[in-house]
Image (cartoon, grey):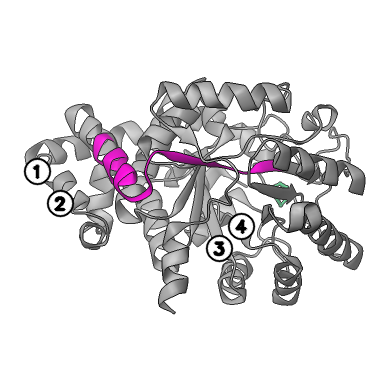
Protein backbone atom coordinates (compact mmCIF):
# COMPACT_ATOMS: atom_id res chain seq x y z
CA UNK A 1 0.00 0.00 0.00
CA UNK A 2 2.73 2.45 0.92
CA UNK A 3 5.39 1.56 -1.63
CA UNK A 4 4.70 4.50 -3.92
CA UNK A 5 4.75 6.95 -1.03
CA UNK A 6 8.48 6.46 -0.63
CA UNK A 7 9.05 8.33 -3.87
CA UNK A 8 7.44 11.39 -2.34
CA UNK A 9 9.75 11.57 0.61
CA UNK A 10 12.54 14.11 0.14
CA UNK A 11 15.51 13.68 2.45
CA UNK A 12 15.88 16.78 4.62
CA UNK A 13 19.66 16.73 4.27
CA UNK A 14 19.49 16.87 0.50
CA UNK A 15 17.25 19.91 0.66
CA UNK A 16 19.27 21.58 3.39
CA UNK A 17 22.48 21.38 1.42
CA UNK A 18 20.95 22.97 -1.63
CA UNK A 19 19.12 25.63 0.28
CA UNK A 20 22.09 26.42 2.51
CA UNK A 21 24.12 27.20 -0.56
CA UNK A 22 21.43 29.56 -1.72
CA UNK A 23 21.08 31.07 1.72
CA UNK A 24 24.79 31.72 1.96
CA UNK A 25 24.57 33.67 -1.26
CA UNK A 26 21.58 35.69 -0.19
CA UNK A 27 23.02 36.26 3.28
CA UNK A 28 21.10 37.20 6.39
CA UNK A 29 19.25 40.03 4.68
CA UNK A 30 16.14 37.87 4.35
CA UNK A 31 16.08 37.42 8.07
CA UNK A 32 16.47 41.15 8.57
CA UNK A 33 13.66 41.81 6.16
CA UNK A 34 11.46 39.25 7.89
CA UNK A 35 11.86 40.92 11.22
CA UNK A 36 10.70 44.36 10.11
CA UNK A 37 8.38 44.40 13.06
CA UNK A 38 5.58 42.00 12.54
CA UNK A 39 3.04 42.47 9.85
CA UNK A 40 5.23 44.40 7.48
CA UNK A 41 7.95 41.78 7.62
CA UNK A 42 5.53 38.92 7.46
CA UNK A 43 4.14 40.21 4.16
CA UNK A 44 7.54 39.59 2.63
CA UNK A 45 7.64 35.95 3.67
CA UNK A 46 6.70 34.09 0.56
CA UNK A 47 6.75 30.33 0.25
CA UNK A 48 10.30 30.40 -1.14
CA UNK A 49 11.63 32.66 1.61
CA UNK A 50 10.04 30.55 4.31
CA UNK A 51 11.70 27.50 2.82
CA UNK A 52 15.05 29.26 2.93
CA UNK A 53 14.56 30.19 6.57
CA UNK A 54 13.56 26.63 7.47
CA UNK A 55 16.83 25.44 6.00
CA UNK A 56 18.98 28.08 7.74
CA UNK A 57 22.15 26.78 9.39
CA UNK A 58 25.06 28.24 11.33
CA UNK A 59 25.00 32.02 11.75
CA UNK A 60 21.78 32.32 9.72
CA UNK A 61 20.03 29.91 12.05
CA UNK A 62 21.33 31.74 15.10
CA UNK A 63 20.06 35.00 13.64
CA UNK A 64 16.67 33.46 12.92
CA UNK A 65 16.25 32.28 16.53
CA UNK A 66 17.56 35.58 17.84
CA UNK A 67 15.13 37.64 15.81
CA UNK A 68 12.19 35.39 16.64
CA UNK A 69 12.92 35.80 20.34
CA UNK A 70 13.30 39.58 20.01
CA UNK A 71 10.03 39.74 18.08
CA UNK A 72 8.23 37.77 20.80
CA UNK A 73 9.68 39.87 23.62
CA UNK A 74 8.75 43.08 21.82
CA UNK A 75 5.13 41.99 21.28
CA UNK A 76 4.36 39.66 24.19
CA UNK A 77 7.06 40.30 26.80
CA UNK A 78 8.73 37.36 28.57
CA UNK A 79 5.52 35.85 29.95
CA UNK A 80 4.54 32.23 29.56
CA UNK A 81 0.88 31.23 29.88
CA UNK A 82 -0.15 27.92 31.40
CA UNK A 83 -3.04 25.63 30.47
CA UNK A 84 -3.59 22.83 32.95
CA UNK A 85 -4.07 19.81 30.71
CA UNK A 86 -6.86 17.37 31.59
CA UNK A 87 -6.81 14.25 29.39
CA UNK A 88 -10.47 13.42 29.87
CA UNK A 89 -10.72 10.14 27.97
CA UNK A 90 -8.65 7.99 25.61
CA UNK A 91 -11.73 6.46 24.00
CA UNK A 92 -11.64 7.43 20.34
CA UNK A 93 -13.69 6.47 17.32
CA UNK A 94 -10.87 7.23 14.89
CA UNK A 95 -7.66 5.50 13.84
CA UNK A 96 -5.18 8.12 12.64
CA UNK A 97 -2.13 6.29 11.33
CA UNK A 98 0.34 7.95 13.74
CA UNK A 99 -1.65 7.78 16.97
CA UNK A 100 -1.08 5.35 19.82
CA UNK A 101 -4.58 5.98 21.12
CA UNK A 102 -6.28 5.01 17.82
CA UNK A 103 -9.27 2.76 18.41
CA UNK A 104 -7.60 -0.07 16.51
CA UNK A 105 -4.77 -0.25 19.04
CA UNK A 106 -6.15 -2.98 21.27
CA UNK A 107 -3.19 -2.79 23.66
CA UNK A 108 -4.49 0.44 25.18
CA UNK A 109 -6.50 0.26 28.35
CA UNK A 110 -9.39 2.67 27.85
CA UNK A 111 -10.51 5.12 30.50
CA UNK A 112 -12.77 8.11 31.05
CA UNK A 113 -12.31 10.38 34.04
CA UNK A 114 -15.26 10.75 36.36
CA UNK A 115 -16.96 14.14 36.68
CA UNK A 116 -15.40 14.51 40.12
CA UNK A 117 -11.91 13.79 38.78
CA UNK A 118 -12.29 16.44 36.08
CA UNK A 119 -13.55 19.04 38.53
CA UNK A 120 -10.74 18.17 40.97
CA UNK A 121 -8.16 18.70 38.21
CA UNK A 122 -9.74 22.05 37.34
CA UNK A 123 -9.77 23.11 41.00
CA UNK A 124 -6.11 22.18 41.25
CA UNK A 125 -5.36 24.31 38.18
CA UNK A 126 -7.11 27.20 39.89
CA UNK A 127 -5.23 26.66 43.18
CA UNK A 128 -1.93 26.55 41.34
CA UNK A 129 -2.80 29.84 39.63
CA UNK A 130 -2.77 28.43 36.12
CA UNK A 131 -5.63 30.64 34.94
CA UNK A 132 -6.78 28.19 32.26
CA UNK A 133 -7.43 24.52 31.68
CA UNK A 134 -7.37 22.52 28.46
CA UNK A 135 -9.79 19.61 28.22
CA UNK A 136 -8.57 17.04 25.72
CA UNK A 137 -10.00 13.71 24.65
CA UNK A 138 -10.14 11.07 21.96
CA UNK A 139 -12.80 11.92 19.43
CA UNK A 140 -16.44 11.09 20.07
CA UNK A 141 -19.47 12.96 18.85
CA UNK A 142 -22.34 10.92 20.30
CA UNK A 143 -25.01 12.75 22.28
CA UNK A 144 -23.91 11.39 25.65
CA UNK A 145 -20.38 12.75 25.06
CA UNK A 146 -21.59 16.13 23.81
CA UNK A 147 -23.93 16.47 26.80
CA UNK A 148 -21.21 15.42 29.22
CA UNK A 149 -18.72 17.97 27.89
CA UNK A 150 -21.37 20.69 28.06
CA UNK A 151 -21.97 19.78 31.69
CA UNK A 152 -18.26 19.66 32.55
CA UNK A 153 -17.59 23.04 30.92
CA UNK A 154 -20.46 24.54 32.91
CA UNK A 155 -19.16 23.00 36.14
CA UNK A 156 -15.60 24.23 35.53
CA UNK A 157 -16.97 27.73 34.91
CA UNK A 158 -18.59 27.63 38.34
CA UNK A 159 -15.17 27.45 40.02
CA UNK A 160 -14.52 30.85 41.57
CA UNK A 161 -17.17 32.51 39.38
CA UNK A 162 -15.71 31.66 36.02
CA UNK A 163 -12.14 32.54 36.80
CA UNK A 164 -10.71 29.70 34.71
CA UNK A 165 -10.38 30.04 30.95
CA UNK A 166 -11.29 26.85 29.09
CA UNK A 167 -9.62 25.46 25.99
CA UNK A 168 -11.16 22.39 24.35
CA UNK A 169 -9.36 19.89 22.17
CA UNK A 170 -12.06 17.36 21.35
CA UNK A 171 -11.73 16.90 17.63
CA UNK A 172 -14.21 17.29 14.83
CA UNK A 173 -17.77 18.13 15.81
CA UNK A 174 -20.78 19.77 14.21
CA UNK A 175 -20.98 23.56 14.26
CA UNK A 176 -23.98 23.18 16.56
CA UNK A 177 -21.87 21.27 19.08
CA UNK A 178 -19.06 23.80 18.86
CA UNK A 179 -21.62 26.53 19.52
CA UNK A 180 -23.13 24.66 22.44
CA UNK A 181 -19.77 24.25 24.15
CA UNK A 182 -18.90 27.88 23.42
CA UNK A 183 -22.14 29.03 24.99
CA UNK A 184 -21.43 26.77 27.98
CA UNK A 185 -18.24 28.76 28.59
CA UNK A 186 -15.35 27.34 26.54
CA UNK A 187 -13.63 30.06 24.55
CA UNK A 188 -10.58 28.44 22.94
CA UNK A 189 -10.46 25.35 20.75
CA UNK A 190 -7.48 23.49 19.40
CA UNK A 191 -7.94 21.38 16.27
CA UNK A 192 -4.64 20.53 14.63
CA UNK A 193 -4.78 20.12 10.88
CA UNK A 194 -1.65 17.90 11.26
CA UNK A 195 -0.79 18.44 7.57
CA UNK A 196 -2.25 21.22 5.43
CA UNK A 197 -1.33 19.38 2.23
CA UNK A 198 -4.27 17.12 1.39
CA UNK A 199 -2.05 14.44 -0.16
CA UNK A 200 0.16 14.31 2.91
CA UNK A 201 -2.92 14.33 5.15
CA UNK A 202 -4.05 11.09 3.56
CA UNK A 203 -0.65 9.52 4.06
CA UNK A 204 -0.97 9.96 7.81
CA UNK A 205 -4.72 9.31 8.02
CA UNK A 206 -6.91 6.67 6.42
CA UNK A 207 -8.90 8.01 3.50
CA UNK A 208 -12.45 7.28 4.55
CA UNK A 209 -15.58 8.94 5.85
CA UNK A 210 -14.17 9.22 9.37
CA UNK A 211 -10.98 10.93 8.24
CA UNK A 212 -11.87 13.56 5.70
CA UNK A 213 -9.49 16.45 5.01
CA UNK A 214 -12.22 18.74 3.69
CA UNK A 215 -14.31 18.03 6.75
CA UNK A 216 -11.39 18.96 8.99
CA UNK A 217 -10.96 22.25 7.13
CA UNK A 218 -14.69 22.89 7.49
CA UNK A 219 -14.40 22.27 11.24
CA UNK A 220 -11.63 24.86 11.58
CA UNK A 221 -13.79 27.33 9.66
CA UNK A 222 -16.75 26.43 11.89
CA UNK A 223 -14.72 27.15 15.04
CA UNK A 224 -13.62 30.52 13.67
CA UNK A 225 -17.22 31.34 12.76
CA UNK A 226 -18.57 30.43 16.20
CA UNK A 227 -16.02 32.81 17.71
CA UNK A 228 -13.48 30.60 19.42
CA UNK A 229 -9.86 31.60 19.75
CA UNK A 230 -9.04 28.89 17.29
CA UNK A 231 -5.81 26.99 17.33
CA UNK A 232 -4.36 24.51 14.92
CA UNK A 233 -0.98 22.96 14.22
CA UNK A 234 1.05 20.24 12.56
CA UNK A 235 3.59 17.54 13.28
CA UNK A 236 7.08 18.19 12.00
CA UNK A 237 9.26 15.49 10.45
CA UNK A 238 6.49 13.21 9.22
CA UNK A 239 7.23 10.50 6.69
CA UNK A 240 6.81 11.91 3.17
CA UNK A 241 6.80 15.51 4.44
CA UNK A 242 8.89 18.05 2.55
CA UNK A 243 10.08 21.58 3.28
CA UNK A 244 7.49 22.74 0.76
CA UNK A 245 4.79 21.14 2.90
CA UNK A 246 6.10 22.83 6.02
CA UNK A 247 6.32 26.24 4.33
CA UNK A 248 2.73 25.78 3.17
CA UNK A 249 1.67 24.82 6.70
CA UNK A 250 2.95 28.17 7.97
CA UNK A 251 1.19 30.02 5.18
CA UNK A 252 -1.98 28.08 6.01
CA UNK A 253 -1.87 29.32 9.64
CA UNK A 254 -1.39 32.85 8.39
CA UNK A 255 -4.16 32.57 5.83
CA UNK A 256 -6.63 31.22 8.41
CA UNK A 257 -5.49 33.97 10.79
CA UNK A 258 -5.64 31.56 13.72
CA UNK A 259 -5.10 32.71 17.29
CA UNK A 260 -2.98 29.78 18.47
CA UNK A 261 -0.62 27.23 16.98
CA UNK A 262 0.84 24.04 18.41
CA UNK A 263 3.67 22.25 16.60
CA UNK A 264 5.82 19.40 17.76
CA UNK A 265 8.20 16.85 16.29
CA UNK A 266 6.62 13.68 14.94
CA UNK A 267 7.46 10.75 17.22
CA UNK A 268 6.71 7.33 15.75
CA UNK A 269 4.66 4.99 17.93
CA UNK A 270 5.40 1.25 17.64
CA UNK A 271 1.72 0.27 17.66
CA UNK A 272 0.74 2.37 14.66
CA UNK A 273 0.97 1.93 10.87
CA UNK A 274 3.44 4.83 10.48
CA UNK A 275 5.99 2.99 12.64
CA UNK A 276 7.15 1.13 9.52
CA UNK A 277 8.55 4.41 8.13
CA UNK A 278 10.63 5.25 11.21
CA UNK A 279 13.85 4.74 9.26
CA UNK A 280 12.76 7.13 6.54
CA UNK A 281 12.28 10.23 8.63
CA UNK A 282 14.87 12.79 9.77
CA UNK A 283 16.66 11.96 13.03
CA UNK A 284 15.05 13.02 16.31
CA UNK A 285 17.56 15.85 16.54
CA UNK A 286 16.71 17.06 13.04
CA UNK A 287 12.97 16.88 13.71
CA UNK A 288 13.45 18.91 16.87
CA UNK A 289 15.59 21.46 15.07
CA UNK A 290 13.05 21.79 12.29
CA UNK A 291 10.25 22.25 14.83
CA UNK A 292 12.18 25.08 16.46
CA UNK A 293 12.69 26.72 13.07
CA UNK A 294 8.97 26.38 12.33
CA UNK A 295 8.18 28.12 15.62
CA UNK A 296 10.75 30.85 14.96
CA UNK A 297 9.59 31.57 11.41
CA UNK A 298 5.94 31.61 12.47
CA UNK A 299 6.75 34.06 15.26
CA UNK A 300 8.14 36.40 12.61
CA UNK A 301 5.02 35.91 10.50
CA UNK A 302 2.46 36.14 13.34
CA UNK A 303 4.08 38.07 16.20
CA UNK A 304 1.06 38.17 18.52
CA UNK A 305 -0.47 34.70 18.38
CA UNK A 306 -0.15 32.16 21.17
CA UNK A 307 2.22 29.32 20.41
CA UNK A 308 2.57 26.18 22.47
CA UNK A 309 5.90 24.70 23.53
CA UNK A 310 4.58 21.17 23.05
CA UNK A 311 5.46 18.32 25.40
CA UNK A 312 6.67 16.41 22.33
CA UNK A 313 9.61 18.84 22.22
CA UNK A 314 10.63 17.81 25.71
CA UNK A 315 10.16 14.15 24.87
CA UNK A 316 12.71 14.42 22.08
CA UNK A 317 15.06 16.73 23.98
CA UNK A 318 15.14 17.23 27.79
CA UNK A 319 15.53 20.98 27.14
CA UNK A 320 12.97 20.94 24.34
CA UNK A 321 10.31 23.07 25.97
CA UNK A 322 12.81 25.75 26.97
CA UNK A 323 14.26 25.72 23.46
CA UNK A 324 10.76 26.16 22.03
CA UNK A 325 10.12 29.12 24.36
CA UNK A 326 13.40 30.69 23.26
CA UNK A 327 12.45 30.10 19.62
CA UNK A 328 9.19 32.05 20.05
CA UNK A 329 6.61 29.89 21.86
CA UNK A 330 4.74 31.39 24.85
CA UNK A 331 2.38 28.69 26.19
CA UNK A 332 3.02 25.51 28.20
CA UNK A 333 0.46 22.86 29.07
CA UNK A 334 1.41 21.15 32.34
CA UNK A 335 -0.37 17.83 32.70
CA UNK A 336 -2.94 17.65 35.50
CA UNK A 337 -4.41 14.28 34.53
CA UNK A 338 -4.30 11.91 37.52
CA UNK A 339 -1.02 9.98 37.20
CA UNK A 340 -2.64 6.54 37.02
CA UNK A 341 -4.31 7.43 33.69
CA UNK A 342 -1.44 9.19 31.93
CA UNK A 343 0.28 6.04 30.67
CA UNK A 344 -2.87 5.31 28.70
CA UNK A 345 -2.92 8.63 26.87
CA UNK A 346 0.17 8.18 24.76
CA UNK A 347 -0.46 9.46 21.25
CA UNK A 348 3.33 9.01 20.90
CA UNK A 349 5.62 6.91 23.15
CA UNK A 350 7.92 7.95 26.04
CA UNK A 351 5.98 11.17 26.64
CA UNK A 352 7.81 13.56 28.99
CA UNK A 353 6.46 14.32 32.49
CA UNK A 354 4.12 11.30 32.56
CA UNK A 355 5.29 10.40 36.07
CA UNK A 356 5.58 13.96 37.47
CA UNK A 357 3.13 15.03 40.15
CA UNK A 358 1.33 18.36 39.41
CA UNK A 359 3.00 20.26 42.27
CA UNK A 360 6.48 18.96 41.26
CA UNK A 361 5.79 20.00 37.70
CA UNK A 362 4.68 23.41 38.93
CA UNK A 363 7.87 24.30 40.82
CA UNK A 364 10.05 22.70 38.14
CA UNK A 365 8.48 24.98 35.54
CA UNK A 366 9.19 28.16 37.51
CA UNK A 367 12.84 27.23 37.88
CA UNK A 368 13.26 26.13 34.29
CA UNK A 369 11.66 29.30 32.93
CA UNK A 370 13.61 31.62 35.23
CA UNK A 371 16.80 30.02 33.94
CA UNK A 372 15.96 31.25 30.44
CA UNK A 373 14.76 34.72 31.47
CA UNK A 374 11.03 33.96 31.28
CA UNK A 375 8.27 33.79 33.87
CA UNK A 376 4.78 32.38 34.22
CA UNK A 377 1.92 34.87 34.17
CA UNK A 378 -0.19 33.39 36.96
CA UNK A 379 -3.92 33.82 37.47
CA UNK A 380 -4.55 35.08 33.95
CA UNK A 381 -6.32 33.51 30.99
CA UNK A 382 -3.43 34.38 28.74
CA UNK A 383 -5.58 35.04 25.68
CA UNK A 384 -4.04 35.52 22.28
CA UNK A 385 -3.10 39.18 21.86
CA UNK A 386 -3.70 38.85 18.11
CA UNK A 387 -7.26 37.63 18.74
CA UNK A 388 -8.03 40.24 21.39
CA UNK A 389 -6.88 43.08 19.14
CA UNK A 390 -8.94 41.73 16.26
CA UNK A 391 -12.00 41.53 18.49
CA UNK A 392 -11.57 45.14 19.54
CA UNK A 393 -11.37 46.30 15.94
CA UNK A 394 -14.55 44.48 14.86
S1 LIG B 1 -5.09 11.63 16.84
FE1 LIG B 1 -6.94 12.04 18.06
S2 LIG B 1 -8.63 11.51 16.64
FE2 LIG B 1 -6.78 10.54 15.80
S3 LIG B 1 -6.81 8.49 16.67
FE3 LIG B 1 -5.58 9.77 18.05
S4 LIG B 1 -6.96 10.49 19.63
FE4 LIG B 1 -8.20 9.70 17.94
Q: Return the residue at label 2.
A: 33
- Whether residue 283 can be seen here: no
Considering every residue shown, the one lying at the far bottom of the view is 394
Mark 3–mark 4 distance (CA, rounded to whole Å): 11 Å
Q: Quadrant of the C terminus?
A: bottom left
Which span of residues is magenta-colored? Answer: 66-85
Mark 1–mark 4 distance (CA, rounded to whole Å): 37 Å
1 or 4: mark nearer the eye: 4
Mark 2–mark 1 distance (CA, rounded to whole Å): 12 Å
User: Going 88% across and 40% down the picture, which residue do you hit?
Assistant: 110
Does the stretch in magenta take in 181? no
The first of marks 2 and 4 along the sequence is 2
Instruction: Say which of 167 and 238 sits in front.
Output: 167
Q: Residues within 10 Å of mark 3 (few under 14, many from 20)?
A: many
Mark 3–mark 1 distance (CA, rounded to whole Å): 37 Å
Does the stretch in magenta take in 75? yes
Q: Residues within 10 Å of mark 1 (few under 14, many from 20)?
A: few
Instruction: Say which of 179 and 144 sits in front.
Output: 179
Mark 2–mark 4 distance (CA, rounded to whole Å): 31 Å
Instruction: Say which of 358 and 348 sits in front.
Output: 358
| SS type, badge 4 | loop
Q: Return the residue at label 1.
A: 26
3 or 4: mark nearer the eye: 3
- Whether residue 1 can be seen here: yes
Q: Return the residue at label 4.
A: 191
2 or 1: mark nearer the eye: 2
Q: Which mark is residue 229?
A: 3
The first of marks 2 and 1 along the sequence is 1
The first of marks 3 and 1 along the sequence is 1
Amino acid sequence: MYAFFRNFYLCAKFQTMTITEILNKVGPSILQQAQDSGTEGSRTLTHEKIKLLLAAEGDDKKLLFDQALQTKLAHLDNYVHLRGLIEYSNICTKYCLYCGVRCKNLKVERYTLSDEEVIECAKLAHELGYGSVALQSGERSDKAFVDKITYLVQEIKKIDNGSLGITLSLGEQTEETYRRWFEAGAHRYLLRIEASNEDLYYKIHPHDEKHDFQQRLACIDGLLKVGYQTGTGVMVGLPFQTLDDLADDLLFFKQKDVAMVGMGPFIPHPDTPLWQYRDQIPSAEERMELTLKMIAVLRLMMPEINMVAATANQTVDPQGREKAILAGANVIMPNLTPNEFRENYLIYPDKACVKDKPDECHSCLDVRLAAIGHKVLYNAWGDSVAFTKRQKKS
